[in-house]
Image (tube, rainbow, N blue to C red):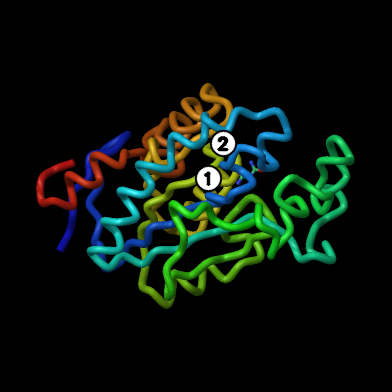
Amino acid sequence: MMIELKAAPANIAFDPARTALVIIDMQRDFLEPGGFGETLGNDVSQVRVAIAPCQRVLARAREIGLLVIHTREGHRPDLTDAPPAKINRGNPSARIGAPGPMGRILVRGEPGHDIIPELAPRAGEPVLDKPGKGAFYQTDLEIVLRNGHIDTLLVCGVTTEVCVHTSVREANDRGYRAIVLGDCCASYFPEFHAVGLKMISAQGGIFGWVSSSADLLTALEGGHG
Ligand code: C5J
């Protein structure tokens, strides 16, 4: 059954059986007070606004049996998968692998690398560890999607202009239709968030569509979102 969703630049119909919910990097280090994001001087309240809409979408996605995929940005403890060009920038005490408030910064297995408890993955939901900003780069996302017969992604997460954008561009180039749920994404910089969403749907949807949690939930109730 096709679901018609209100979106920009135009409404889009999707088949839930061929659609995955992809939640990008909702990790403690990016979202929690006292985490790495905050130590960089960011105001985490700017990104925490996305948690509640994500929870509503996640709950409904689970109810209707959508494929739910979570991603985490981070590296091996020995940093062999972290390019020096990524490590050697910014304040040395806040670099990848340095001790941070929630363990070593952006290192797998550290408390800050975990997904926030509000959106904790359930058994059976793929969790993809990615060394880059994009969810496709050096991960098995593409084969997971192919095996699930997925053609459309509902995308949530942080930050809008970095990992969400990169992932959506990668998805678009691989032939997937990416629908970004705007209020389920966030940035430490509200102006980047707003412009980031506009960039996706501009020019006839140059690399995706933008919708919202409310429109998605309405559409899934049978009404037109
Ligand atoms: C993400 C980042 N997840 N901003 N990372 O967007 O470095």
Q: Residue at x 37, y 35 (%)?
A: 204
Queried on whether the Cβ of the residue with tag 2 lies below 8 angstroms from ligand 1, the answer reads yes
The residue wearing badge 1 is 164
Q: Nearer the viewer, residue 183 or 39?
A: 39
Q: Nearer the viewer, residue 20 or 58?
A: 58
Counting from the top left corner in percent of width and height, residue 81 is at 79, 64
Picture quadrant where residue 215 is located: top left
Q: Amino acid at mark 2?
A: Glu
Counting from the top left corner in percent of width and height, residue 21 is at 38, 58
Q: Amino acid at mark 1?
A: Val
Query: Mark 1 touching mark 2, by CB under 8 A?
Result: yes
Determine whether the residue tagged by mark 1 lies in a helix, strand or loop. helix
* CA–CA distance in space, label 1 to label 2: 6 Å
Residue 22 shown left or right of residue 44 in the figure: left
Q: Nearer the viewer, residue 203 or 138?
A: 138
Counting from the top left corner in percent of width and height, residue 115 is at 54, 56
Residue 161, disc: 2
Q: Residue at x 60, y 28 (%)?
A: 43
Quarter of the image that includes the C terminus: top left
Quarter of the image that includes the N terminus: bottom left
Q: Residue at x 38, y 74 (%)?
A: 148
Q: Nearer the viewer, residue 52 or 148?
A: 52
- Circle 2 residues within 10 Å: few <14, some 14–19, many ≥20: many
Queried on whether the Cβ of the residue with tag 1 lies below 8 angstroms from ligand 1, the answer reads yes
Image quarter for ligand 1: top right
